[in-house]
Image: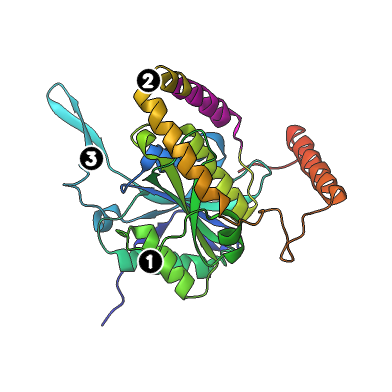
Amino acid sequence: MTDKPSLVTFLVDEAELPRGIPLVAGLTGFIDSGSVVSQFTEYLSDTLDSTLIATFDTDELLDYRARRPTMYFDQDHFTGYESPRLAVFLMRDDLDQQFYFLTGFEPDFRWERFCDEIIKFADRFEISVATWVHAIPMPAPHTRPLGVTVSGSRRDLVEAMSVWRPHTQVPGNAMHLVEYHLHRTGHAVAGFVVLVPHYLADSEYPAAALVALQSITAATGLIFPTDRLRGEAREFDSNIDSQVQDNEELASLVGKLEVTYDDYMKVQNLRSPFMNSDGDLPSADRIAAELEDFLAMQRRRDDGADGVL
């Protein structure tokens, strides 16, 4: 019996690709409250340097009838079509740190083979940590910090960041299964579910996308440019606050959610993500030294000393 053909096609020489860097993932197609995954993936693609290194076999993984491709028609004939793509990019963050970015549609078929390919990728390129984002609606107010549920093998992140840790059954998605297999095979993996206020779940909520970026930073140390997204989040929140003030029913809802949220958070005991394993915060000297390193690296980038992809 012959082995099944690979679902992945590399577009560059695999021997030249870096080892020991993070894998970041965001797949669209399942529940995406606040359009968090869509914003997250588009923002990284728009703001960071990237190189396409591999694609997955769309014909094997996509249900075309569920997600029909866009066809281009010119008066009397078709000129082309745009099929969804699932691919891996090699990207650089704001400090020129490299990482792999898995983005595109969530596979409709062959989830186990898809997981096998991700595990092979993680092994081949000695992935330091695999991390991904997702978002669900939650009865929480927009006037309080957005929370996340953290899963995977990184107990430090769970203890520091996970505000909701239910015992429940959930409808699985492809990245749930990937995380399960990565964890089972001993890989470092962290999944982040952003808890979006339920009354904003159908909107494009910039603050939630910002939390997704910050969560990936906590897991990987990657630094992303967030100025534009922060501006969009401030503008969006200002508009929501105005609507709440003008709507008594909505104001009452938000007020009740605030009380429930505050009562819940009183009993949470989250570690600061800045603490070390002994529960100690870094000293002022250490923070200052790391800030100086960051500014020096930024100056080198501005002067053109560092290369780009």
Distance between mark 3 and mark 2 Cα atoms: 41 Å
Q: Which residue is mark 1?
A: 115
Whether residue 307 is visible to the viewer of this picture, yes or no, is yes
Whether residue 91 is situated above or below residue 168 in the rendered picture: above
Q: Which residue is mark 3?
A: 69
Towards the viewer: 103 or 255:
255
Whether residue 169 is situated above or below residue 133 in the rendered picture: below
**Can you give x and y, in whole percent of width and height, for residue 287 in the image?**
81, 47
Mark sitting earlier along the chain (3/2): 3
Is 37 positioned to the left or the right of 19 in the image? left
| Residue 233 painted magenta | yes
Mark sitting earlier along the chain (2/1): 1
Towards the viewer: 293 or 304:
293
Is 184 positioned to the left or the right of 224 in the image? left
Report the amino acid beneath label 1: Cys
- What residue sits 44% from the left and 64% below the top? 179
Towards the viewer: 222 or 238:
238
The circle drawn on residue 185 is none
Mark sitting earlier along the chain (1/3): 3
Towards the viewer: 173 or 9:
173
Q: Which residue is mark 2?
A: 247
Q: Which residues are magenta?
A: 225-240
Report the amino acid beneath label 3: Pro
Distance between mark 2 and mark 1 Cα atoms: 47 Å
Q: Nearer the viewer, mark 1 or mark 3?
A: 1
Distance between mark 1 and mark 3 Cα atoms: 25 Å
Q: Nearer the viewer, mark 2 or mark 1?
A: 2
Badge 2: few (under 14), some or many (20 or more) residues near its Cα, within 10 Å?
Answer: few
